[in-house]
């Protein structure tokens, strides 16, 4: 596990964007796992800038989104389809056929989820999975109690997640869709590399439990402790409850010095 602590979220986005830029240059048909929410917006902005100003080419890149709400139309302002178009897909040259997102309907979800998993496998697996984290320690919409072996499936959002996401639905918790299709924890941890970004004081408890707490299905992100290549990119506020933060900083400084 690598823990990188930076003064603010902009710096985290820069590091994440550089990792992705290098990877796309090395492997033009990179398979990227993508997240939505407030956290990766700065990252997408930088990737768009790299495409427009430096000509970084995404024409062979394949993307798989972590999750999508069930029960709101794809063109709803808060759907993750809309989010991805607005923040990323409309501004780079990833072909439509390479953009995979979970469906927004419950019908045939079992076969849809199986097909989603098969598509990931057919593309050779996810090279880099971008993740945010919920206050309750969720990754994707894998809420506390999700099996570490779980695969893409239908899931119910926890109360903590409904409350956190209400801000995007006019502060009306009843307007937040209660269900979603999400990649499972097993799907996520199959990615060759995971990049988890977190910023802000409201993430400090989830981050402390995830990095330094016992591995438990009650804190789904702790599954990442067993991943061979996971990078936690966190700002000072989100890192503020980590006991070993000085050590993580020293390790990162040494890595930069000697690489
Ligand atoms: C979104 C997702 C979620 C978010 C998490 C944090 O695709 O999978 O796990 O990453 O809820 O959301 P923000 O970034 O809005 O705090």
Image (cartoon, rainbow, N blue to C red):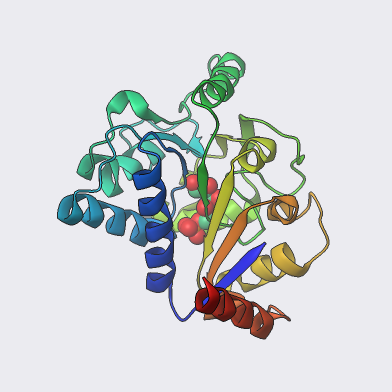
Furthest-bottom residue in this view: 246
Residue at 29 percent across and 39 percent down: it is 58
Is 167 situated left or right of 250 in this image?
Answer: left
Residue at 57 percent across and 48 percent down: it is 193
Say whether residue 208 is visible. yes
Q: Where residue 89 sits in the image (x, y, percent)?
A: 28, 40
Q: Quadrant of residue 2?
A: bottom right
Compared with 175, 9 (above or below) is below
Compared with 180, 206 (above or below) is below
The N terminus sits in image quarter: bottom right
Residue at 79 percent across and 66 percent down: it is 213
Compared with 29, 238 (above or below) is below
Say whether residue 201 is visible. no
Q: Where residue 67 sits in the image (x, y, percent)?
A: 51, 38
Q: Where residue 7 sits in the image (x, y, percent)?
A: 46, 81
Is 83 situated left or right of 193 in this image?
Answer: left
């Amino acid at each position: 596990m690598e823990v990188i602590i930076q003064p603010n979220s902009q710096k985290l986005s820069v590091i994440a964007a550089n990792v992705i830029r290098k990877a796309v240059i090395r492997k033009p048909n990179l398979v990227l796992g993508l997240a939505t929410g407030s956290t990766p917006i700065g990252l997408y902005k930088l990737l768009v800038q790299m495409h427009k100003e430096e000509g970084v080419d995404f024409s062979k890149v394949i993307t798989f989104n972590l999750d999508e709400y069930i029960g709101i139309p794809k063109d709803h302002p808060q759907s993750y389809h809309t989010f991805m178009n607005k923040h990323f897909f409309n501004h780079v040259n990833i072909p439509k056929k390479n953009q995979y997102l979970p469906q927004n309907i419950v019908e045939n979800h079992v076969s849809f989820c199986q097909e989603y998993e098969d598509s990931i496998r057919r593309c050779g697996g996810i090279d880099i999975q971008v993740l945010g984290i919920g206050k309750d320690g969720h990754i994707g919409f894998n809420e506390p109690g999700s099996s570490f072996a779980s695969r893409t499936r239908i899931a119910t959002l926890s109360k903590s997640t409904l409350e956190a996401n209400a801000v995007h639905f006019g502060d009306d918790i009843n307007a937040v869709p209660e269900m979603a299709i999400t990649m499972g924890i097993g799907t996520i941890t199959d990615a060759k590399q995971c990049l988890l970004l977190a910023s802000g004081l409201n993430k400090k408890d989830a981050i402390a439990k995830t990095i330094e707490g016992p591995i438990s299905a009650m804190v789904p992100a702790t599954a990442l402790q067993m991943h061979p290549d996971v990078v936690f990119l966190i700002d000072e506020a989100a890192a503020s409850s980590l006991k070993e933060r000085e050590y993580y900083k020293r390790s990162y400084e040494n890595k930069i010095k000697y690489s």
